Amino acid sequence: VLVYAGDNDLAEGRSPQDVLRNFVKFVEDIHKELPATRIAYISIKPSPARAALIPQVRETNEMIRRYIAVAHNLEFIDVFTPMLDAAGLPRAELFRADALHLNGAGYALWKTIIAPQVR
């Protein structure tokens, strides 16, 4: 199972702790019924349109990464770091004109990061 979650939650005012709590509940619910299920969390991306939220995105990603590090059948896929430029800002060329949604180049980058994790 691939999970991308938390981006809109943070934008709607939820806290990194809320996002972590929701992810933990999701994992527990899946593993209660299907304990051998592999779950991979795709980190929250750094969007130019949501640059003000980058500190919360970093915190959320790190909290989820720490949770995953001590859990079973979980993986963390970091798309956040490769989406930053040399100055640590979101790479605008990976986004559509709205600066929020990925364009073809953004999805191509994600494919190179995610595909090896699911084979």
Image: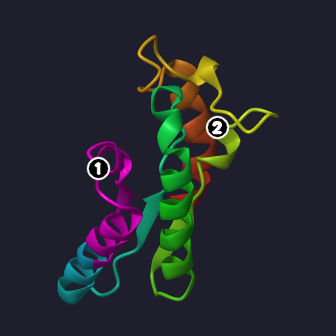
Give me the C-alpha separation between circle 2 and circle 1: 23 Å
The location of residue 61, given as percent across then percent down, is 52, 61
Report the residue marked by disc 1. Answer: 13
Tell me if residue 18 is in the magenta stretch. yes
Report the residue marked by disc 2. Answer: 83
Q: Amino acid at mark 1?
A: Gly
The extreme right residue here reads 86
Question: Mark 1, residues whose alpha carbon is within 10 Å: few (<14), some, or many (≥20)?
Answer: few
What element does badge 1 sit on?
Answer: loop
| First in sequence: mark 2 vs mark 1 | 1
The location of residue 39, given as percent across then percent down, is 39, 70
What element does badge 2 sit on?
Answer: helix
Q: Amino acid at mark 2?
A: Met
| Residue plotted at (45% across, 65% down) | 40
The image quadrant where one finds the C terminus is bottom right
| Residue plotted at (75% across, 32% down) | 85
Give the camera-side residue of 114 and 106. Answer: 106
What colour scheme does the image use? rainbow
| Residue plotted at (51% across, 58% down) | 118
Question: Mark 2, residues whose alpha carbon is within 10 Å: few (<14), some, or many (≥20)?
Answer: many
Left or right: 66 in relation to 36: right
In this view of the protein, can residue 41 be seen by the observer? yes
Give the camera-side residue of 4 and 8. Answer: 8
The location of residue 79, given as percent across then percent down, is 58, 47
Q: Which residues are magenta?
A: 1-24
Left or right: 93 in relation to 96: right
